Image (tube, coloured by chain):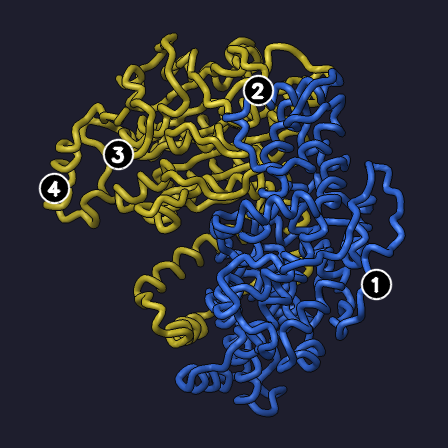
Amino acid sequence: MKTDPPSIRPTRAFAPRGERSLKPQGIGALEQRPRANGPILRVSGGADDEPEPAAPLTDAWLRALCIDLMGRPPLPKERAEWLGRQRKEFITAVLQTEECWAHWLREQLYYFMLIDQFRPVKTSLDEIPALLADRTITARYALHRIGLSSSFDQRNPGADTFVTVVMEQFCGIEVQRATRELELGKTAYDGSPGLFLGSMANNQSDVVRIAVRHKDAARHLLEREHLRLCRAALPRKARGKLTRKLHESPELFFELFEEWLHSEPYAARVEEGAPVENHVWVRMVFLDLSGKLPSSGDVEALRSALDGLGDPAPLRSAIVRMLLSSEGTRAPALSELKAVGNWVDGLFARLLGRAPSPQERTAFIAAAKAGDTGPETVLYTLMTSSEYDNP
Amino acid sequence: MNPTPPFSRRDVLRGAALAGAAGMVHPLGHAFAPLRPGLKTERVVLIVMAGGVRSRETFGSPNQIPGLVRMAREGTLYTRLRTANLGHFGASMSIVTGISEARGIRDNSRGPDPTLFEYVRKDLGLSASDVWVTTAGGAQQVNYAYGLHPDYGSKFGATTLDGDGIFNEEFKSTVKRFGVPRPLDEAQAKQVADLRRILGSGSGRTSKAALKEAEARARVEKYILSELGKGVTELRGAGSGDAKALRLARNLLSVFKPKLIGVVLQDADVAHGSFNGYSEVVRRNDAAIGELLDAIRGDETLRDSTAVIALPEFGRDADLNARRGLDHGDGSDDLRFVHGVLWGPDFRKGRVIKDDQRTIDVTPTIASLFGAKAKHSKGSILKGAFA
C-alpha cells in the first residue's frame, strides 16, 4: 500500500498567471492565460440564492469536496485541520494541488475510455497535473495532449473510428447528423488537405487540433464537466454565454470550475449525495479502512472487476468483507475499542458525513458490543449502505 | 412499426390463466414453461458477434466457421440483415433495443430505450437471476443491461458480467492476496439486515424487497467467487475476452438455467490492425459457439427447449486499409449487411432467407418467443424463421 498522500495545506498565493514563463510544448502555442477580469461567470441564479462560500466546512461538505476533487475521502489530518473552517478557503487550496488535477486527468482518461490496456503509463501526459495545478496550461490544452497521445491513437484505430471519436468526444457532435464533416475529417486523417469543421486540415493531428479548438468543444467541455461535478445539466440559460467566453478565453475554465463548487447545483449534490465511479469507490474503501491509499495496481484490478458488472453492489460488498478480514484494513476487535459510543459517532461522521439518529446510535452501539465481530458487522453495514455509496 | 407477435396476446393470457388455475407460482412467470402456448422454447441465448464481422469471413468462408454452418443447417439463416451502422456501441445497443440507437463510439452511459432484457423481465415477472448478459468489451458494454426508460430501467435489468473485466489474473491474485471473503454466517446476516432497516429508515424500501434484493446479490456474489477459481480466468490469447464471455454463458446455462442470456462479443475489432488476428478471432468464436451448442445438445433439460440466435452488429469495409487491416466506415454492403442464424425448437430447419431484414428485428422476435412485447421497438418479428 502507498504511503499517505500529502494533505491539503492552507492556501498559498498564486503567482500572477500572465507572468509565468511558458515552456514550449511542441504542439502549437500554449494558451495565453491572462487573469480573468470583469464579472464572475455566474451559472445559477442571483447572489441571494447562492450558497454561502464563507460557510464552515462540515463533514458532509469536506467528504464530498475531497471525493469530487481528489477522488478520495479526507485524510484524518485533513479532517482535523479543516473541519469548521471556510469552504472557500479549502476549495481554493485544493484547486492548487497536483493531486486535484491528477484526479481530473484520471476522469478525462476514463471519459475517453483510455483504460485497461489503453491506459497511458509513464508518458508525457504525467506532467499535465502539475502544469494544471500552477495554471501553466489550460484544460483545453490538456485535452489536446490527450488527443495526440499514442494511447488515444491505439484506442481509436483507423480513420473512421478516430475522426468519429474526435467529433463525438471532443465536440459532442452526433456524427450521424454530420456525415459530410466525418468524410472531410477522414480525408484529412489520410493526409489529403481539406476543410474540417471550418478550418484547413492536412493530417491526423490537424483533425485533433481543429476539434479541440472548435466552439462546440468549449460547449461540450462545459456541459460534461458541470454534469460530472454538480451531477446536474448546465442551465440552458447560461450555456451560450459561457461557451462563447470559454471558447475565447480557455483559461476561464479554472474560474468556472471553482465557481461551480459554490453554486446551488453543487450544494444540492452535497445535500442529496451522488454515486461515484468504481475507481473512486475503491480509493474510498481503502482510505476509510486504513487511512492510506491503495496501490494503483490494486485500484485497477478492483476497478476493472467492478466495471465488469451491470450492478457492482454484489462485488462491492464482497470486497468490503475481504478487506475487513485482511491485514492493514482489518476491522478492530471489540476489545480494542475504548468507548464504543464515540467510535460509532466517529464512524457516522467519517463514513456518512453526519451524526447518527438516536435510534441508529442505540442499534449500532448494541451491534458493536454483540461480540468480537461486532465492530466488523457495524463497519460492513455502513460501508455497504447506499448512503456510503452516494457520498 | 409496432411488432405483432405471431401468437396473439390473448393466447398468452389464456395460457397464463390456465397456469394460474393449475396453481403455478407466477401466472406469467418462470414456473410456467414453455412460455408461449404452442411453442417449445423456454430459454434463449442471443450472441451479438460485435466488433464488426463481415459475411465474407463467416458464411462466405464456410470452412472457417463449421460451428455456425452446422447451426444454420439445423436452423434458419438470414443472408441480408441490414445493420444500424452507428459505431460498435450504438449498433449493438440497437440489436438489444430494437431501435437504431445513435450513440457515441466511446459513450459510456445507459441508452434512453428499454432493452430486450427489460421487456422480458417485466412482462414475465422474471427475477434478475433469470436474465443475464455476458460481455467482452469492458465497462462500456455493461450499459446493455438496461436503459433509462421510466417504465423499465434498473429494476428490470439483466445481471451483467464482463468476462475479461472480472475473471482475469489481476483480480484473482488481488483476491488471493487479501484473502477470499468469507460469507456472513446466519446470525451476522440477520444482524446486518436489522441494522440496514434502521439505517436511514424512512427510505421507503420495504424490508421484504430489501431482503429479496440482498438474497439475489448474495447469489451473484457467490457465483463470481466460485467462478473465479475455475477455468474462465485461465483463458488467454487473441480473442480471450470473447472466449470468456461465451464460456460464462455456457457455465451460467448449467448453473442457473436462465431464461435469457445475451452474449456481447468485441474482439473481432482487432481487424483494424490485423486481418489475420481478426480471422483467428472469428475461428475461435465459432469454435466456442460450437461448444456452447454441443453443451445444449448434450443436456436433456436444454436441448429441446433452448434457442440460440447469433449475428454480428455490422460488417467491415470492403477493402483492406493501409495497415492491411479492415476498418468499418466505407458504407459498402460488406459493412451494412450481415448474416444471422436462428436455431432452436421453434425455428425452421435448413431454411435460408435472402430477403432484406434488419438486425433490430431480433429484439421483437425474441420477445415474441417469450410472449413479451417489445413495445418501443421499431423492428419487426422475423416471422419467416418460425416453423
Task: State which mark lies toward you, 2 or 3.
Answer: 2
Colour of chain A in the rendered structure image: blue
| Subunit under mark 2 | A
Tell me which corner region of the image, top left, top right, bottom left or bottom right, holds residue B77. Answer: top left
Task: State which mark lies toward you, 4 or 3.
Answer: 3
| Subunit under mark 3 | B
Q: Quadrant of the C terminus of chain B?
A: top left
| Subunit under mark 4 | B
- The residue lying toward the viewer, choosing from A360 and B256, is A360
| Subunit under mark 1 | A
Q: Which residue corresponds to mark 3?
A: B373
Question: Dot 3 lies on which element?
Answer: loop
* Residue B244: x %, y % from top left: 57, 37
Question: Dot 1 lies on which element?
Answer: loop
Of the numbered discs in the image, which one, if any, rests on residue A180? Answer: 2
Spatial distance from mark 1 to mark 4, Cα to Cα?
Answer: 77 Å
Q: Which residue corresponds to mark 4?
A: B17
Residue at 77% from the left image edge and 64% from the top image edge: A2
Which lettered chain is shown in yellow? B
Spatial distance from mark 2 to mark 3, Cα to Cα?
Answer: 38 Å
- The residue lying toward the viewer, choosing from A329 and A277, is A277
Is residue B180 in sight in this rendering? no
Q: Is there one chain holding both mark 1 and mark 4?
A: no
* Residue A333: x %, y % from top left: 60, 82
* Residue A73: x %, y % from top left: 63, 68
Q: Is there one chain holding both mark 4 and mark 2?
A: no
